[in-house]
Image (spheres, rainbow, N blue to C red):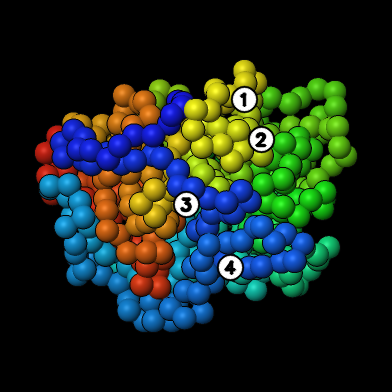
Amino acid sequence: MIRGPPCTSSRRGPKGHRRISQCPVAVRAGEESRSPTSRRTSRSDDSRVRYRGVSALRLLATLGATAAVAAGCGSGGDTTRHSLPAGFVDELVAAVAVPTDLAFGPDGRLFVTTQAGTLRVIERGRLLRRPALDITSRVCPDRERGLLGVTVDPQFASNRFIYAYYTYKKFGVCPSRSERAPVNRAVRYRLRGDGTVDPRSARVLIDNVPSFHGTHNAGDLGFGKDGFLYVSIGDGGRDYSERTFKSWANEAARDRNVLLGKIVRITRAGDPAPGNPFSGPATVRCATTGPVKPGLSCREVYAWGLRNPFRFAFDPNAAGTRFFVNDVGEVTWEEVNPGRRGADYGWNLREGPCATHGLIRCEPAPPQMTDPVLAYGRAEGCGSITGGAFVPNGIWPREYDDAYLFADFLCGKIFMMASHGGSSMSEFAVGLDVPSVTSMVFGPTPTGTALYYATLAHGGQVRRIAHEQSGARGAALPPG
């Protein structure tokens, strides 16, 4: 845990990795950080809250998407080495307009979601012309909304299930702060033999999660080794029940009667997973109902107290279900949180290792709350944590075994936290073009295993970082 004063100076780390300052920069109370899809706005009812920057996804969708698709795809045609440790290479896989998430199938196919609402497929290094799924007519792609997440069932070889998280245009329009605002949902689909999704197979597992303000939708999905589906959901940006219009005062993540600001754990059929924290009297199923009566607790909730847990990642090296949750901060801190049953990560009462808006000399979290494994501030232009991935043991040089990699959308960097834990972070990749990474996943290459990442740079790309001697230790990651 980072406790006061929670700052480290910039210095050289092991193997030439540069450790960076984790000190927050001074920010006016109420000033909100820019998440991967935020945009500048101003409202008379909340003059202290403003977004820093234009909506990257919105801008690229309108100005750069056509050019990105027309650019086609390639493998190795666009290569850069200068921002990586010795022995690593970064290369273009495909140009995909405004990509949001990545997931590999067991046969090595890479599924890519786009904000607009298509599921693209990269097969043998080539972007297929025909989307596997097109739900653009059902998706609200404005602000931080859109088709935001995808995952593949671990039993895909037999059931052909894939899962998607998107903002559903429930009333045919996409307003904010309106009774007709869209909702977020998670849907299970079946992939046909021709590589396209059967739309008739859609089974809605989570529904009616308010996207009241259009921000903080989160949207990651993934299966743990326990066989259950985990879904991350943000706090909605502003209070869905209109108790306040201030972002930092939004209590949705603390409300146990709504799935906002939570990690949800369900079965592949959408039922609450056995062993979730809330069961018995005063608990109900909330998966498709939306908010329920105050005083009740949702049985699908696994952990709570999160602001915008845009991405989380499971550790493939762990014997059981171990994962970290990347939560985008508001004013001072970006968080990497340990995934724990019943954890309360503290938002909106805490941000990072401090009480909300706290900077230094912060007290540890109270016993009923969980501090982050690591938190970093806004130094060096960073300020929006996104994709994360654990390095599978044996695929890269030994010092990378079980390290945790995580990206920042604003400063174009991928950081590393070593497997021994602690609060130290070092730079793994720097100088990535911005707007930057939205998702990361390890997957197969023709010669080994690489870190694939989606970026909004240049209208949208899927790229991969590989070690030139990745097969030297003889531990290639199997597809899926």
> Which of the marked residues, 4 or 2, is nearer the chain's N terminus?
4
Above/below status of 176 relative to 185: below
Helix, strand or loop for disc 2 = loop
- Direction top: furthest residue: 367
Q: Is 20 left, or right, of 175 in this rendering?
A: left
Task: Identify the amino acid type marked 4.
Answer: Arg
| Quadrant assignment, res 279 | top right
Q: Residue at x 53, y 62 (%)?
A: 52
Q: Toward the viewer: 359 or 161?
A: 359
Question: Within 10 Å of the Cα at label 4, are there few (<14), some (14-19), or many (20+) other Cα atoms?
Answer: few
Give the residue at mark 4: 40
User: Disc 1 and disc 2: Cα gap in Å?
Assistant: 10 Å
Task: Identify the amino acid type marked 2.
Answer: Leu
Q: Are dots 1 and 2 in contact, CB under 8 Å?
A: yes
Helix, strand or loop for disc 4 = loop
Question: Within 10 Å of the Cα at label 1, are there few (<14), some (14-19), or many (20+) other Cα atoms?
Answer: some
> Which of the marked residues, 2 or 3, is nearer the chain's N terminus?
2
Quadrant of the image for the N terminus? Answer: top left
Q: Position of residue 12 (x, y in %)?
A: 20, 38
Q: Is 214 left, or right, of 480 in this rendering?
A: right
Task: Identify the amino acid type marked 3.
Answer: Ser
Residue 102 appears anywhere in the view? no
Q: Position of residue 151 (x, y in %)?
A: 50, 49
Q: Position of residue 231 (x, y in %)?
A: 59, 43
User: Which dot, 4 or 3, sits closer to the camera?
Assistant: 4
User: Disc 4 and disc 2: Cα gap in Å?
Assistant: 25 Å
Give the residue at mark 2: 349
Give the residue at mark 3: 384
Q: Residue at x 68, y 51 (%)?
A: 247
Give the residue at mark 1: 369
User: Which dot, 1 or 2, sits closer to the camera?
Assistant: 2
Query: How many numbered marks have been drawn onto this rendered protein structure?
Result: 4
